[in-house]
Amino acid sequence: MNYYLNIFRNNFANLTIAKSYELFCICMWSTLFNDQLTYSARPLFTIHDGPPYANGQVHLGHMLNKIIKDTVIRKKLLLGYRVWYLPGWDCFGLPIEINIGANMSYCVYYRYAVSQVNLQRTSFITLGCFYNWDLYYCTVDLRVVFRELNAFYLLVNLGYVFVSKTYVDYCSECTSSVSHYETEEVHYVVGIQCFLLRSLAYFACCLLFVFGECIYIYSFATKCIFRGYCSVNFIKFVARYAYRVFKELVFVRGFCWRHKVALRAVFRYQVFLNTCLKVPNSDILSTVMFFPVATYGRFCKSVFSRPYWCISRQRTWGIPITLWYFRNYIVINSFKILKLLAVYGYRSWRRLTLAAKYWFFVKSVDVLDVWFDSGLTHYTVCLDQSRALLTLPVDLCVEGIDQHRGWFNSSYLTSVLLNTVTPFRGLLTHGFAVDQFHKKLSKSAGNFIPVSDVINRYSLELVRFVVVTSDYFKDISFCEEYFVTRAALRKKILNVIGFLTANTIDYPISFFPASLMLVDSNILAILAYLKLQVGYYDNCYHYHISFNLICDFLFNELSAKYLSIVKYRLYVLYKYSYLRLTCQYVLRYLLRELLLLLSPYLCFSIEAIWTSYFSGSVFSNMYMSSPFVLSHSDAGLMRELFILKAHCFSCCASYSNFYRLVIYTFNISIYTYRTHLPWFFNVFSVSVYYGSPAVHLFPFYSLSKCLRCWNYFPFVFNGFCRMCVTLLCNS
């Protein structure tokens, strides 16, 4: 029998997103990204992309980084910013040369790099990020290359670039020198170690190594190595000349990170960048905000631990170092070379020669370090006049923790040397993608998981949900148990959202209440405070804390308290009664704000729900300012009422609405709201008396239950209460 209750069903708890709808959202968000850039009244927020290397498939580290940047963009849009982000790719370097082969033509390397950029760009598009993927930059672009050469010549003229002959680590498999960050150190215990002092007047400190019967002595004064053999006088020799003796020597041997072969030292000319900064560190870094704050020390250690940076590499695929030098002196006018290269192309450098009388000048055949290429993107991209929206310093850079010695390092050093400013105002560092054993997921470790496999197994939205709701400042575990728990949490969230949508589907939008009940004003005031908290943690990029606050509001404040109180007003009262409409007004306001708060976390599901009940896209809107503030007395009253309700549950966990509640309190204002208290406590009647705080429950077993509203009354007519009879007759 239909009793005309106001109950509507929803299917959002089991909402699944089709692939076709994902593609539709991706196309729509790309258009919205272009549209939001035209909102000149909004403040501009810029994010500079640390270019990933254009080689191989997209891995989980790439996905983690892009989703975090995408979440930052969505959050800033909801806060009222217009956001500029330009994705990029690093196209030079050794990995491409290893895959293609050494000493190939530039065209072969270039075509391979472009194909890898297109491959990765296609994979990134399927992640559902809020970008325009038709706009991007590559370090192999001619405009970027010539701006980099111009920056290099500026550093030369400023005196920061010099040439020196020194030892470099050389890998026979790479056929190139490798940097310190591309090596692995293996420790061997090989003998005893002594520090020798040959003469108190000479102060020549030496190192002595013992390998079996051989003795090797290295003199710091003469830079020479002497070899000898153990003899019967060896103990006397050590006792006479050694002032410090160790029983064991830990010998460190460097190995190539890629090929696992031992490195050998090669003595040759190298180009260095003097990284001794001209501005005190505290003056520069005081303008940079680190997220999390603990990464400040790591950043300082990685940047200021080396006085010089070797920027030359003995490779083929790279931007040539266009210098002639004589011994340790750079002798050719740099900008004159730049003009010639602008006419004939930078690849013509290998064909340039000098007159025969300058035979003693050495022409550089090396290329620039790939970290120098990507580190100068603040100059080659951000300061490029054709990209007017990018400024220096940018507002935020987001990369993994390994980039403290990589892109963060090179960007900071080159920007300070060229511009005496940092390239970024904010530095966000995230962790790695790890497995259930907390081991980094990588190809070299053998536990690599393709991004497509993870998305096909768990769905794109769930993968994004796991990343954004995790504490990404630490490592994120991609394991089965974590995905199962997050899927259950997503279902609970959509269930609450579904309740709000089902009970506002018949709400007339033109209705605006003159006043609200205290319980309605209370939930809106709590929501306003929640938005302040979320805004604070969003500014610190602690999105997982913001999400936990939203979930606490959804499950504890909204679902467990408010919705359990207003169900009678929604289900039982007349469809267009004032009390029901005011409740629907509150629910619709809650629905709108909660959809905005949850949209960066469940972007596809929230977009689908938003377009069903509101106009446009959820990301074309902003948070509304909340005017709902409770007075101190009303807030105290609501706290006391919820404490009394919790006390009722503790006294009788199964109490129902055939009980009579007696309240003793010193708070006189509770008596003012006595007519609404039966709905609040879900009982038959409430009596309020002045006295020491206490609550008493008395059951009424003589009451009859209404078949429609399920409340208890002294008199019912054919199973219905008086109010339900009136509503049924009118309907």
Image (tube, helix red, strand yellow):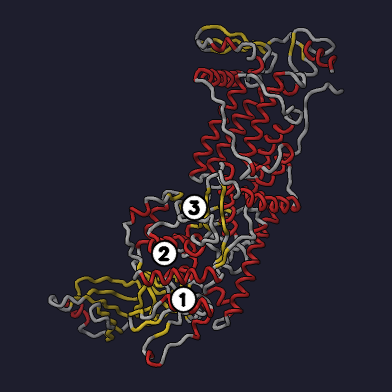
Position of residue 728 in the picture relative to residue 168 (left or right): right
Expressed as whole percent of the image width and height from the top left, the position of residue 329 reads: 33, 80
Disc 1 crowd, CA 10 A, few/some/many (<14, 14-19, 20+): some
The residue that appears at 55% across and 73% down in the rendered structure is 95
Which quadrant of the rendered structure holds the N terminus? top right
Point out which mark residue 338 bears: 1
Which residue is disc 2 drawn over?
414
Q: Is residue 227 above or below residue 319?
A: below
Q: Quick one: 601 or 154, which is closer to the camera?
A: 154
Q: CA distance from mark 1 to mark 2?
A: 20 Å
Point out which mark residue 396 bears: 3
**Secondary structure of the residue carrying numbered label 1:** helix
Q: Quadrant of residue 518?
A: top right
Q: Earlier in the sequence, mark 1 or mark 2?
A: 1
**Secondary structure of the residue carrying numbered label 2:** helix
Expressed as whole percent of the image width and height from the top left, the position of residue 133 reads: 64, 59
